[in-house]
Amino acid sequence: MDRYEYIGHLHIHSNFSDGSGSIQEIARAGREAGLDFIGVTDHNTLAGREEGFEGRQNDILVLIGIEFGKEKNHYIAFGVDKLPGDTRDPQKVIDSVNAQGGFGYLAHPGEKSNPAFLGGKAYPWDRWDVKNFKGLEIWNFSSIWREAYHKKTVAVFWFFADRYRGGRFPEPETLKKWDILAARRPVTAFGGSDAHAFPVHLGPLKLSVFAYNFLFRTVNTHLLLKEKLSRQSSRAREQVLKALREGSFFIGSDYYAPTRGFRFSAVNRDEEADMGGEIRRLPDTVLRIISPSKQGVVRIICNGKLVCESRRKIVVFKVLQEGVFRVEVYWRPRLGKPIPWIYSNPIYVKEQKPEAGRQETE
């Protein structure tokens, strides 16, 4: 069964915290970029919802989430209505979010400091003893870009010469951590830009450091729904949150080429599973991958290890073992090495358990 695909952008800050734009301006930028939804996650406040900005605005769905945390261990949550009493303890934050029926992701967990930005401050995640979080942010455009250039003069030059660097690859250490965690239990991969659109004055020149409408064409979230996105705001919100909760989406770096049309599923004679789902390993279980372009290199990862690489647009892979399967697709430019382009959420393949009194025959 095919799915309805909707494109959105997550991890956005407005002027209700430390972003420069109003939610109306951000929604307008999202609509101009061709998005179907945006997720505004201001720091430690739900003012955007309290002021009535959640819902459809000029043909784009606005979700209001929140980013908890101050010095480190930031947590992005959706589906919550109030702040926990103690935001200093990340486990208490996670527990409070879950108790409200919400869910969340560890924000920019592998972020590194850089003396050229934010006074050398960084906001990584260091409490790996926490449990019951939904996923983690493997790709944060702003964090990746800020880590690259350690002198302000060099950073200013590369801002004009290589603005897209933050969209070229996810954080390598976080990718490894994700594979380790996903081997223990389902863990969702999340991506965003951490958009703030900081205004900067360089003499007479005024510009926005990574404007919203620029970032909304970079690291996007592509939801795959079983039914069309509702025109009714509350129902559409439920649909998007359900897909995010279940991991029924992929991260697409849409700057070089559109990633719309990517598909990843598993199927056998009895059942079918989409991203975020689970399937039994039967003798006829296969993975099915569709790349959006013939210029893509499809890589199938099982339990953190590469098990297949193909330049075909459609790949059918026979599953010979249980494990956590995910897909990476790299874009092949005319010059240079392939560039990370698409990251799927996993499909969990489990061994079939023999029925009582019978032996499994394969």
Image (spheres, grey):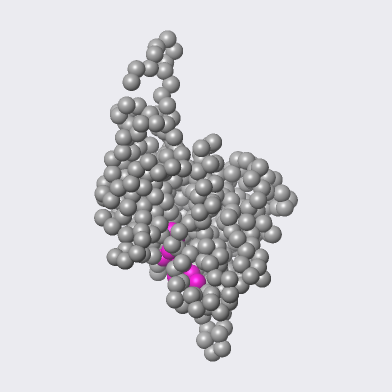
Does the magenta portion include 218?
Answer: yes
Q: Residue at x 32, y 63 (%)?
A: 333
- 228 on left or right of 131: left
Q: Residue at x 46, y 77 (%)?
A: 160
**Which quadrant of the figure has residue 277?**
top left
Residue 359 image point, x, y percent: 39, 13
Does the magenta portion include 153?
Answer: no
Q: Is residue 67 above or below residue 276?
A: below
**Total of numbered circles in the picture?**
0
Residue 293 image point, x, y percent: 28, 56
Which range of residues does the magenta coloring cover?
210-220
- 26 on left or right of 266: right
State the quadrant of the C terminus.
Answer: top left
Is residue 360 visible to the viewer in this orientation of the structure?
yes
Residue 306 image point, x, y percent: 40, 44
17 or 52: which is nearer to us? 17
Is residue 52 visible to the viewer in this orientation of the structure?
no
Q: Is residue 100 above or below residue 144?
A: above
331 or 16: which is nearer to us? 331
State the quadrant of the N terminus.
Answer: top left
Q: Residue at x 44, y 68 (%)?
A: 164
Residue 173 image point, x, y percent: 54, 52
